[in-house]
Image (cartoon, rainbow, N blue to C red):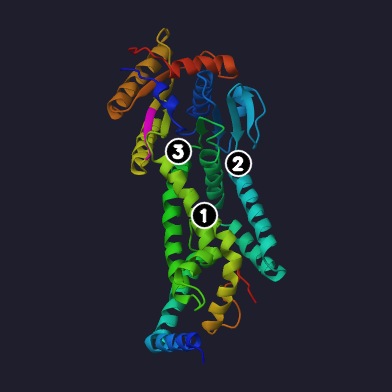
Amino acid sequence: MLLTTLDDLLAQQVVFFGGKGGVGKTTCSAAFALAASRRGRRVLLVSTDPAHSTADIFEKPIGSSEREILPGLTAVEIDAEQEARRYIGDVKRDIERMFSPAVIKQAHRQIDMAAASPGLSEVALLDRMIDLIVGRSADYDLVVFDTAPTGHTLQLLRMPEAITSWIQALVRHRRAVVEIDHGSDQTAEAAAKADPVLAALQRRHERVSRLYSIMTDRRRTSFVLVMLPERLVIDETARAAELLNDAGIDLGGLVVNRVLPDDLTGDFFLSRKAQERTYLDEIERRFKRLPRVIVRQLPRDVYGTEPLTRVSEQLMAKASLEI
Amino acid sequence: MSFDEFRQRFGDFLHGAAYGGYELELRRQTGELNDLFLLLCFMEATALPNPATLYLLEVYPYLLEQFHSWHLRMGIEHSPIGTLPCC
């Protein structure tokens, strides 16, 4: 199997790491971010997995606000529920500045009801991602996302498309109403410009569509799927690859994580190794056209920058090896 | 009557002559379009999922008044949606 490297992805603006639960997304994304920062890129590592473990890997506290943990490497752990609460708080404050108490009371009730709806925290998470991707390009060269397990993340990444087409439909309807219903004192166009509902919808539409255009631009954004040489993981990874393709997101490579070392002895390990061989062959067959990187299992868990550097070296390995 | 005033009135007359016949129909259609817009915004209240809910939060205050006039127009005295009490 020809081994490639994630080296090419260092030039991207956004790199997502995803995969089935427990395959080592956090370790790989941290190792990749570390490698990028050591090559002089200003890197933001964002964890969106509700079970945050980035802080454990770097053995440093990381919170919901950006924090530089190593030179050139800033990390942040974002929590969907918390983002939803923050967003709703912001909206309520905005409303309080603009409306009468009676309207505010009713609006708050409506907002609280909407806040309880499922899916809202995902949209809030997406909104924070927009801030980090679109709004911070002056501060960071590369944003690396350590995402939640596959299903969740793929749904999240397909949301911008759904949201933009929704808002577009809303804008179309609202515009039609405003343009027909404008008073005789202004033109249809002026009425549309002055409508606060239309303005708010268009502002949102613009934000989400900017994210969408960055995400689907293969020269700027790539997705890396992390996997293990195991039956169930291979199947889920294949499905994820298909979905990413449908969503128009570039699949930049596969990381085959925790591959056993070659120099094992004993019946147990030899039998394990033989089984792994068949899975590696299957991976090679099924993901023929994708760059694949092998990361070998280390004798100990990966904690701290030293072991992380060893994973980085494997991700960025220049040489082509045979396994 | 100055010439400007005459022109203004003549203009209004022509506008009325041209649009008057259609005004009722136009208003009806606008009303229906607006109802559809409201439905799209308040879908959650009718238990239909709406991917843009979060982004609609900030426009709700503007829409409350319209929602009120909608349920009156429908001949419903009080808000028909329990979770959206407006009067």
**Residue located farthest toward the bottom when viewing the structure as drawn:** B1
Q: Which amino acid does label 3 sit on?
A: Thr
Question: Which residue is at the front of the view, A321 or A198?
Answer: A198
Which stretch appears magenta? A249-253
Residue A130 vertical placement versus B87 (above, below): above
Q: Mark 1 or 3 closer to N-term?
A: 3
- The kind of residue tagged 1 is Arg
Image mark 2: chain? A
Is the stretch drawn in magenta largely helix, strand or loop?
strand
- Closer to the camera, A6 or A12? A12
State how far apart marks 1 and 3 are (Cα).
30 Å
* SS at mark 3 in the image: helix
Residue located at (67% from left, 69% from top): A103
Say which quarter of the image contains residue B72. bottom right
Identify the residue under disc 1: A203
Q: Distance between the residues labelled 2 and 3?
A: 17 Å
Marks 1 and 2 sit apart, C-alpha to C-alpha, by 24 Å
SS class of the residue under badge 2? loop
Q: Mark 3 points at which residue?
A: A150
Residue at screen point 41% across, 21% down? A7
Find disc 2 in the rendering and name its residue: A79
Asked whether residue B36 appears in the rendered view, the answer is no
Quarter of the rendering containing residue A106: bottom right
Q: Which chain carries label 3?
A: A
Q: Which of A292 and A278 is in front in this view?
A: A292
Residue A314, x across and y down, in percent? 44, 16
> Which label lies toward us, 1 or 3?
1
The quarter in which the N terminus of chain A is drawn is top left
Q: What residue type is labelled 2?
A: Asp
Label 2 Cα crowd, 10 Å radius (few <14 / some 14-19 / many 20+): many
